[in-house]
Image (cartoon, rainbow, N blue to C red):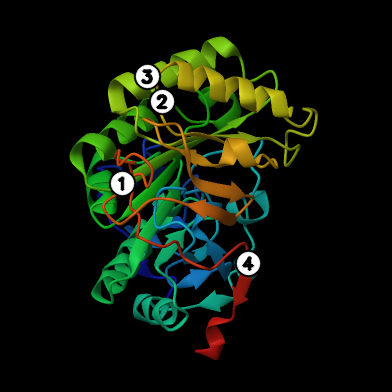
Amino acid sequence: MTDQYPGRYWHRQSDGRIFCELCPRACQLAEGQRGFCFVRQNQGGKMVLTTYGRSSGFCIDPIEKKPLNHFYPGTSVLSFGTAGCNLGCKFCQNWDISKSREWDRLTDQAEPAKIARVAQQLGCRSVAFTYNDPVIFAEYAMDIADACHALNIKTVAVTAGYIGPEARADFFARMDAVNVDLKAFSERFYRDITLSQLAPVLETLEYIHHHTDVWMEITTLLIPGENDSSEEIDQMTRWIAARLSVDVPLYFSAFHPDYKMLDKPRTPHQTLTRARSIAMANGLRYVYVGNVHDVHGSSTYCPQCQKCVIERDWYELGEYHIDHRNSCGFCGATIAGHFEDQPGQWGSRRQSVDMRAF
C-alpha cells in the first residue's frame, strides 16, 4: 500500500504543471496540488494516486442494491469505495465518503489479489466499486478487476460516467456490469447542481452500449423541482430508447434531503410512478422505482406476455421464472440481462467485512 502509486492519464505542460486527462474536468496541477477529486496529486512533477490500496470499508451486499436487477439476481457482491469524487453534487447521498478529506477514514487496506481472494472465499459472485465514484481510483479498480477475472469473479462499477476517452476505454474493458448514474437530462442541472457537464456522460453511455460487452443499467435520482418534470423525463427516456436500447433497465429513485440540499422535500411516490409510466410509454421495457417500498414497481415483467418473471420485495426475491438462456418461463421470450436457472440466495443482508481477518 502506498500513497505514491503512479497515476495514468496525464501529461506534463511546458509551465511545469501536469494536465490530468482522467476526466473532463481537466485539472492542471502545480507541484503538491491535488485535483478536484482530491485523490490525484502532482508529486515531483508526476501524477500519483493517493488512495491506491485503501478503502473506506468493505461490505457484502445483494447485487440488487447497486442497483442491478438484471445481472445474476439474488447473488452477493463484495462492495467497497475509497474517498473523494470528481463531481460536486449538492445532493450527494454518500457525501461522508465522496467528499471526505480525512484519510484516516480509509482504514481497510487490501491489495487487488487479496480482494479477489476474499470475494471468492466469501462466495461473492462479483466485486463492486461503489460508494464513491471508481473513475477517480481507476488504476486501483482496474488492477482489482484483473485479479478478480483470474478467479472468475465478475466486476461491477457504480459510476456517474464522468470520464475521458482514453481512460474510458481502459476502464470499461475490465468491467462486466455497470450502473451509470444519469443525474438529469439538462446541462443546467449538471452545471449548477453537480458542477460538471451532461455531454460527456451521454458519450460514456453511448460508448458502453455500442462499443463494449458491459451489461449496463441506469439510475436517475428524481429531485422535486429540479429534474422531475414530465418534459425532462420524456426527453431523457426518448433519448435512451433511440440512442441506446429499449432493453436498458432504468431506475427512478427517491431523493431524501442530504448534504447541501436540505431544503428539498423527499420525492413523492407518485412522482416515481409517473416517471415510470412515461418511460414505459416511450418503449422502455424494464423500468423500476427505487428507495421506496413498491413490489410492483420493483419487479421484472416479460415484455411479451407481461407476466412477472422476477418478484422483488425490497431486496428479497419471490417468484422467479427465467432460465440461463434468458427465456421467460411463461412464453419463452427473451429477457435482457444475465440470468441463471435459479436465483442466488443472498437475500437482503448487508454484512460488513474486516479485511484484516483474511
How much space separates mark 1 and mark 3, taking CA atoms?
Answer: 27 Å
Q: Secondary structure at mark 4?
A: loop
Q: Secondary structure at mark 1?
A: loop
Instruction: Name the residue carrying label 4.
Output: 350
Label 3 CA crowd tier, 10 Å (few <14, some 14–19, many 20+): some
Q: Which residue is mark 2?
A: 284
Which one is in front, 26 or 75? 75
The kind of residue on which mark 1 rests is Ser
Residue 35, horizontal then vertical, whole percent: 46, 48
Does residue 327 appear to the left or right of 297 in the view shown? left
Element carrying mark 2: loop
- Residue 337 pos. (x, y %): 34, 46
Query: Which of pointers 4 and 2 lies earlier in the amino acid sequence?
Result: 2
The answer for how far apart the CA atoms under marks 4 and 2 are is 31 Å
Numbered circle sitting on residue 327: 1
Query: Which residue is under mark 3?
Result: 239
Say which amino acid is labelled 2.
Leu
Picture quadrant where residue 285 is located: top left
